Image (cartoon, rainbow, N blue to C red):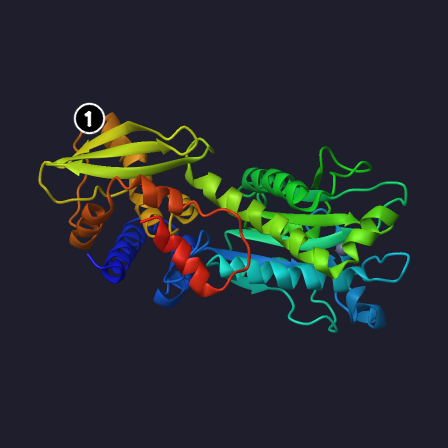
Amino acid sequence: MTPGKRIAALLLVVLALAACSRLDGRSSDSASASESPSESAKAGPLSGRTIAVDAGHNGGNADHPEVINEKVDVLTGKKPCNTVGTQTDDGYTEHEFNFSVAAQLVERLESAGAKVVTTRDDDDGVGPCIDERAEVGNKAHADVSVSIHADGGPDDGRGFHIMEPVLIKGHTDEIVKPSQRLAKRIAKTYADSTGIPPSDYIGDEGINPRDDMGGLNLSTVPVVMVECGNMRNSKDAKLLSDKDFHGDIAEGIADGIVDYLESALSILGQKRQYFVSKFRNVYNLHCLNLRALRRRAMSTVKDPDGNGIPEPANLHMSTMRRIGRGGPLSALRPWAVAVAAGPGPDRRRGRRTALRGQPAARTAQRGDRQDPGAAQAAQGRHVRAEPDAARVDRQAGGR
Ligand SMILES: [Zn+2]
């Protein structure tokens, strides 16, 4: 099969699977919104993903207190619509820093194949309010929403911290756990990329759960706010003011996002890849441990009628969104996980797996089964902004 046909066929797998597991309206909206052929065609570890990037504050806020001081409801209280933000002793402003880092982050995420939505596209406007910012990620059904800030902490304290939401019953129930995982990942990759240590004046190992932030409380998608450092601390301020350093900052955040999204697709959160092979009428789900380069069979599903892919009847769309739509091989992941999850009640009652004809999917599966090389290639990790050609080369190299 030609690469073009293979990608098209794999795309059909994903779309077919998405179509048969639309269990709730919200997710199906997002599927149709983010799976247009042009977006899905982008290669990279984040292809098919939507990321919301919020550059905190705005350059015009200081001149418009009447706008930004309006109170908005953040579930646990009322907060100003927006604030001016902090600045270094030398007068380098947080809004400018946030905007610069956000721009670099967007570039990296898009380069890795993501669709990115942002809350502001210049640095001299006013607002938007924090509730509207949260709404940007919500409306886009983003896989991840990340807000960029720098802190105005005590001058003798340094380091970054990442704010994550806490449980507000009936509101943040769905996002607390994934947001915690996201925060942890970014804390690690951010420290690695920037050398900035976790904060020594707030939070725990750079993680700071908060119940008073509108951007966290009002989000319906996994969200964190990254306080990239302390602008009031001379060491941090020197780094944060250095525009050449903003690429490292953005890279640290982008790497964490990729890490989080990739870990979400492995059931145990480890570096594993699931794939499927078929022999006669038996499908086997394999787990490839990418660290140990070990493969083991996980699950077997019989296909007595020869109709192909089992319907992932009990696979929730949100799982699908987390696991699906990576590079070519990873397009098989939704199916692999569907097999792992099984048809639930049916399996418990010992009934036959519900089967469903998916000719295109079968073709794709034959083309790609048991291809550990591609599996590793699909794990393209470090997210640097790079020209399309270079990225395509790297993707093609593993197959
Ligand atoms: Zn801020």
Image quarter for ligand 1: bottom right
Q: Secondary structure at mark 1?
A: loop
Residue to which mark 1 is pinned:
350
In the image, residue 331 sits, relative to residue 98, either above or below, namely above
**Residue 137 lies in quadrant:** bottom right
Establish whether ligand 1 lies closer than 8 Å to the Cβ of label 1: no
Q: Write the residue at 41% across / 43% down.
A: 319
Q: Is residue 82 visible?
A: no
Q: Is 10 or 392 nearer to us in this picture?
A: 392
The percent coordinates of residue 126 (x first, y second) are 74, 71
The percent coordinates of residue 37 (x first, y second) are 34, 65
Q: Is 127 or 336 nearer to us in this picture?
A: 336
Q: Write the residue at 37% across / 37% down.
A: 273
- Left or right? Give the position of 109 relative to 277: right
In the image, residue 266 sits, relative to residue 129, either above or below, namely above
- Left or right? Give the position of 92 relative to 356: right
Q: Write the residue at 37% across / 65% down.
A: 36
**Residue 123 lies in quadrant:** bottom right
